Image: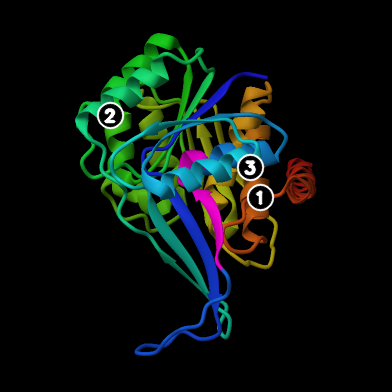
Amino acid sequence: MSRIVTLTLSPALDVATTVPRLYPDAKLRCAPPVYAPGGGGINVARAIQRLGGRALAVFPAGGSTGRHLTDLLSAEGVPSQALAVEQWTRECINLVECSSAQQYRLVMPAARLGRDEQEQLLAALQTLPRPDYLVVSGSLPDDLDEAFVPRLLSWVRQQRMRCIFDSGAAALRQALECGGVFLIKPNIAELSALAEVEIAEPGQLAGIARGLIAAGQCQVVLVSLGPQGALLVSADTTLGIAAPTVRKRSTVGAGDSMVAALTLKLAAGSELVEAARYGVAAGTAAIITEGSELCRHADTEQLFAWVQQQSAAGAG
């Protein structure tokens, strides 16, 4: 198994709860809160752990919320390296209204990282044993130095590792312009923003993705299509991967679960298509869990068998 490291620049302590009904100007009596470590790369490492793999989660952590997050990761058995920073780690709230089953996700601003803290984070990464895969996932802090991502990806190229980058459109654009990215996982809105065009039909997705690859900005694009699955595009592959139809309970962590499963399979030596199918299965598995839960191993394996069966039937 290849070595996997995840980097989360905007970690969060996630708080999940429910309320019978949501309405203004009154005290809303919530269910006891459930706390979980959060942030893109942290969730990727957690999901890899659940799927039987191992990844080191690297992230900044500040204040009592940062300590709580680190303790929760440790309790799950997820290897981590936290850089102590001045600002407290943010808390984000996932609230479900029981009467309607509607989900509300309250995302707080990420803690700011000082210049010295950013330097320390880069230095910490560079002193680790060389990973084969670096997953950079989640939003970037507003005050992140413009040179941070270019310097990070320069190191990636020098070390000849595979970098999987999953963030918002602005961060993706910066990463693609730097080069050194192996795979990106945008959704339709992010891909549209990258291309600066409105996507009106599915056929445009593959064309935009192939353009990024032809320009040498990345090697693989995996477009997340939500309940419809995903579109995988590489230099020699364009493949739609259907997702099983399931009852949605929560969308939190679905994208992170997809990235985790994809990376785990690639690190184990699987072909790209099989890894992408496993990613779709894990993303779907996260949807059938509640609150901030990620994919479960048994669900992922069962859904992966369905995805594989459908793929074989389509090929036949």
166 above or below 123?
A: below
Q: Secondary structure beneath disc 2? A: helix
Residue pictured at 28% horizontal, 40% vertical: 86
Q: Which residue is mark 2?
A: 118
Residue nearest the observer in this picture, 140 or 230: 140
Q: Quadrant of the N terminus?
A: top right
SS for dot 1: loop
Query: Which dot marks residue 295?
Result: 1
Find residue 164 and report its horizontal and vertical position in percent.
Answer: 47, 30
Position of 169 compared to 282: left or right?
Answer: left
- Single out the mark in the foreground, 3 or 1: 3
* Total numbered labels placed on residues in the image: 3
**What amino acid is at disc 1?**
Cys
- What span is colored magenta in the figure? 33-42
In whole angstroms, how far apart are the C-alphas of marks 3 and 1? 18 Å
Residue 171 quadrant: top left
* Distance between mark 2 and mark 3 Cα atoms: 27 Å
**Tag 3 residue:** 75
The reply, left or right, for residue 144 in relation to residue 14 is left
Q: Is residue 243 visible?
A: no
Point out residue 186 in the picture as x, y percentages from the top left corner: 43, 44
Q: Earlier in the sequence, mark 1 or mark 2?
A: 2
Q: Residue at x 63, y 64 (%)?
A: 290
Q: Nearer the viewer, residue 137 or 91?
A: 91
Quarter placement of the C terminus: top right
